[in-house]
Image (tube, grey):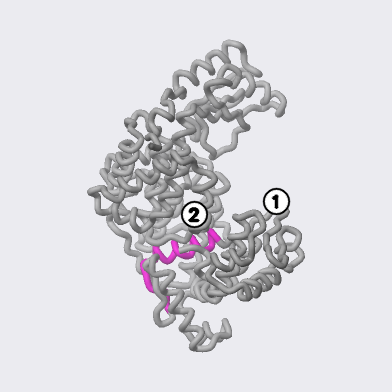
Amino acid sequence: MYKEDFLDSADRTIYLLAQRLYLLDQPINKDDLAGEFGIAVSTLERYLQLLTSLLAVPLKQEKIKIVNTDQLVALALDGHANLDQILLNDLVTSSINFQILECFYWHGNKSIVQIMANLNLSESSFYRHLRTLNQLIAEFDVQIKNGQLIGKELQIRYLFYRIFRLTHALPPLDEPKIAFLMQQLQIELNFTFTQTSLERVRLWLEVAHQRLLVVHQQDQDISAQVQELYQNNEIYETVAKCYRDVFKVQRHKNSHFEVESLCIMLISMSVFNTTTNVVTRFSTIYRANKTSLARVVREVERSIFKVLGIKQNEWSFELTKSIFDLYARLFCFHGNLDALNDNYFDYYQQHYFSRESQFVVAQIMTELEQTSKPKLNELTRQNEHFLKLRLHLIIREFRYQAKHELFVGLDTTFDIEADHLIGDMIKAPFKNELQVNVSSYQPGHSYDLIVTNYRIGAYDDAKLSYQITSFGTQKDFKQIHQLIKDRFYRKTPIKSVLPPLD
């Protein structure tokens, strides 16, 4: 499901027209454009007029406008425009389908009469939208019946999480305990969330908070294959301790579900980067427990290794973590609401990913579809486009690693000019054979190496750290260079592992 699926037919066509013009980035003949959408030119003109009126708002006019001549039409941008923010999110949040779901979010169970009154809908119009909405959310295993959202609580929360994550329609909640819980999680896990991770965790907790306020009887069942991901794993006890300390609750059923659902979110929503100790510890335990997801990840990797013709030691832990992140969400939750529809996918595949990458991804998808693992076959069939795009990104990461890319963070007490000097000293001997990216250290990001002049001890978000005094010495930099060669210098030329195109 895509965001524009919430829209009525006319608004959906208007948005897809705008998207087509945006991706085309040049004028197009109106006859050709009308033919693409299977509509008459007169109908196209009407849609273009509606689109122009939607954009005829001062803040929007400054960024985007329709250039409409007798024969041609184009979308003019100022270079700093986000089509989703300017157009799609407003269309979605003002749509009837979205507003019906929003009623259930804020009020829990609500009578059909109340919803029709609130949205000023006739009975026939309400039931028409309800049928459409139920078709949309069916992939989340959620339905609206008799004024109630029916489904497992975990799935209902996931549905709201995805909707608000992509539309940014949920106003920030001023709840001190949520902020305190996030702070305690970082302390107990010895991990600093990135800004993106903070937003993901905060939104999940806000949705959970609202559901507890408005719905008191919930189907809190969680499947055994999801529970096994955090059973006998330290992440559960850490999250449980933080939750109970913050909310002052004892070990009763409701708090148990809240802890479990938060664990599932942390595991499946790419909250942690690849170099943190908590990730490596979790990975070791969940694989030792022989979980169903571990078997799926291993089978996916086998398919990738077969296509690329590589061995396990040529595939980094970071890439294994990427495969885990890709499948964990599909494994823990049903349904997907994606911002990138088929048009974006086709555009990116054509312009951003090489023919070699397209060949490799197609071969991997074939392998995944033919595997003997029923669960993997099911996930592959149900999420084909989602998987293809993410596999392109993972293969791209593999190519970068094969090209010897390294990320170094500088955590110093110096001004920026001194950091530039140290960065140049680190990069100097590798200009022709290794791409060394040096930047100021940001907690929660992923680094291969951190160089510091003040901190003693390991960093949780880096594989290695190196301490220098002041600007360091020639010996320091020789040791740093040797460390990089010994620990990070991979010698897997990408052309030797990508299949030929012929």
> At 26% from the left edge and 43% from the top edge, which residue is drawn?
290
Residue 175's label in the rendered image is none
Q: Are marks 1 and 2 in contact (CB under 8 Å)?
A: no
**Residue 39: % across, % down:** 56, 72
- Amino acid bearing label 1: Gly
Q: Which span is picked out in magenta? A: 148-166
Secondary structure of the magenta portion, mostly? helix
Amino acid under label 2? Val
The reply to whether the magenta stretch includes residue 152 is yes
Mark 1 surroundings: few (<14), some (14-19) or many (≥20) residues within 10 A: few
Q: What element carries label 1?
A: loop
- Lateral position of residue 59 relative to residue 246, left or right: right
Q: In this view, does 183 lie above or below 131?
A: above
Location of the C terminus by quadrant is: top left
**Mark 2 burial class by Cα count in 10 Å: few <14, some 14-19, many 20+:** some
- The residue beneath circle 1 is 79
Sequence-wise, the earlier of marks 1 and 2 is 1
Q: Distance between the residues labelled 1 and 2?
A: 45 Å
- Does residue 314 appear left or right of residue 475 in this picture? left
Residue 118 visible, this orientation: yes
Nearest the viewer among 45 and 217 is 45
Residue occupying the point 72% across, 65% down: 69
